[in-house]
Amino acid sequence: MRHFPPMNNNSPMADSSAAAVSAGVPTPAFSPLYQQIKGLILQSLQSGEWKPAESIPSEMELAARYRVSQGTVRKAIDELASDHLLVRRQGKGTFVATHAEDHVQYRFLKLMPDRGDLDSEGPAQRDIVDCKRSRANADIARALALRTGDAVLQVRRVLSFGNTPTILEDLWLPAAPFKGLTAERLADYHGPMYALFETEFGVRMVRADEKIRAVLPDATQSQLLKVSPSTPLLSVERVAYTYKDTPMELRRGFYSTENHHYRNALS
Amino acid sequence: MRHFPPMNNNSPMADSSAAAVSAGVPTPAFSPLYQQIKGLILQSLQSGEWKPAESIPSEMELAARYRVSQGTVRKAIDELASDHLLVRRQGKGTFVATHAEDHVQYRFLKLMPDRGDLDSEGPAQRDIVDCKRSRANADIARALALRTGDAVLQVRRVLSFGNTPTILEDLWLPAAPFKGLTAERLADYHGPMYALFETEFGVRMVRADEKIRAVLPDATQSQLLKVSPSTPLLSVERVAYTYKDTPMELRRGFYSTENHHYRNALS
DNA sequence: CAGTGGTCTAGACCACTGG
DNA sequence: CAGTGGTCTAGACCACTGC
């Protein structure tokens, strides 16, 4: 079970004494031990050895498993926790992060009511407008790292808060990992879509990039959101990634900002 | 120079043996040593003991000064660095972060060209349209933690990239800290405004909150940005804060998203 | 009470920078 | 080469959770 450092001279412990300058080549890149441990933990997350919401082994156990000190696995876990891949809970353990938790329900949704917060508007109402198989055009394919013409699932839905339709979203998903996803399945599920992806398809969204623009709705869009065609909307194009930076979803959202705004913290 | 922990029983070192349960009151709140050190460093930053772009004392020196181990000040500095208040540079030292650096010029500006990056469009052109003294109305006063009627500076400017006007901004600044700021001063300065605030007024912007909406421009706005009145714009309302969460600027920006988008990373 | 994560220390060695 | 931040270890003790 002992891991070995890549191609550089930074192995720890007993073997750290003599190994230094071996080949004459310039040492390629320095990768500290805790980064390697981080990689190993990441692999276990990816492979499903530890599932969302489950606890992972204690720091002591992991230290023994990887033959490093507790401090080293601690630093690895620290980084994974600040990436929101793990969640530490003092006295209880370290857990695999999940989208299926009340207090982080809307982690990727930055829309906020102008007064109060999303919870104060009651549970979001999610209406599936459409869900069909189709083929990726050039744009979709590029975003999802597929080839043009590859099978994708296309979903359209409307999110309403307090009975006011607020978000219209078009989603594209690679068909393969989401085999079996149907309109019924989606309509029957009341909760965050990313939570369903985790439990039903083992796909965990880890990070996302959004590009935001101001646009005018087309006829269909203004109808679905019940706004006039001259009401500008926020266009939010999101690519969401699983582990290893694999794109797994393209989402084009249209947000009504009559009573809401997109909130962003800069630091 | 020795600091003492707040009202709780967590002093380190020699005195950590017997101090535990003293008064019968429930221990108020636990504040680890490194957090206290962080607070002390923050104070020195605030007071101007170490100025932007300068280096702060080495970890060893700080450890001696605060009578704690190097590891403890390290953890304090780590947090300040991840808050972007300090910048660590291996082999050189730890420096006070600044907005006047090439590679972080646009740290708070999330607008990106649809192709390429901001640098590829050449230097931003900043045109001051207006700069005048006025009085805060209720909205402005609330945002800046002032009283209605307090003196404020009001600035209007246009940012152009590659000769295309792209951003129209209205700024409100509390008059007191920015005494002496004039249209000329602004027009003569070519560089990030927050850099000027640092060097000329000792005001360092540390974080900001933005609220984004889609809006239609009024006549003046469409004229200044050279877009038609039916072209939707991104409305970006920012409150920027110095140390201690003191609001120091309210900024209302109108971004043309014809060839640019607001980029945001979710994680 | 045992087990978990959280803090703190002390000391060794490594990688990087600049004179 | 000395000085800086960066890594790693080992061990002690603290705070929190749940049985």
Image (spheres, coloured by chain):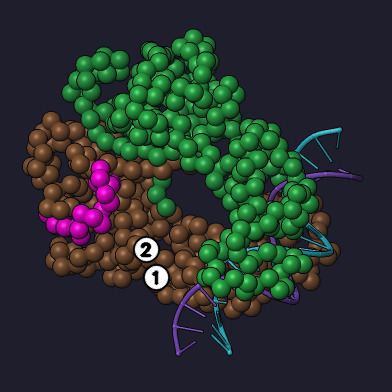
Chain colours: A green, B brown, C purple, D cyan
B98 relative position to B136: left or right: right
Query: For residue B227, which quarter of the picture?
Result: top left
Magenta-tinted stretch: B111-130
Query: For residue B40, which quarter of the picture?
Result: bottom right
Q: Are marks 2 and 1 on the same chain?
A: yes
Look at the numbered disc 2 and give the secondary structure of its residue.
loop
**Where B225 sits versus B217, above or below?**
below
Q: What residue did someone put label 1 on?
A: B52
**Where A236 sits versus C2, above or below?**
above
Whether residue B54 is visible here, answered yes or no, is yes
**Where B119 sits versus A9, above or below?**
above
**Where B109 sits versus A98, above or below?**
below
Residue at image coords 51%, 36%: A242
Residue at image coords 52%, 15%: A180
Viewer-nearest residue: B141 or B12: B12
Say if the magenta span includes residue A165: no
**Given the image, on which type of amino acid does mark 2 rest?**
Arg
Whether residue B45 is visible here, answered yes or no, is no
* Marks 2 & 1, CB-CB < 8 Å contact: yes
Q: Which residue sits furthest front?
A: A23
Viewer-nearest residue: A77 or B140: A77
Observer-side mark, 2 or 1, equals: 1
x then y, percent, for residue B200: 28, 70
- Mark 2: few/some/many CA within 10 Å (<14, 14-19, 20+): many
C12 relative position to B142: left or right: right
The Cα–Cα distance between marks 2 and 1, rounded to whole angstroms, is: 8 Å
The numbered disc on residue B204 is 2
Q: Which residue sits furthest top?
A: A184
**Given the image, on which type of amino acid does mark 1 rest?**
Pro
x then y, percent, for residue B262: 30, 42
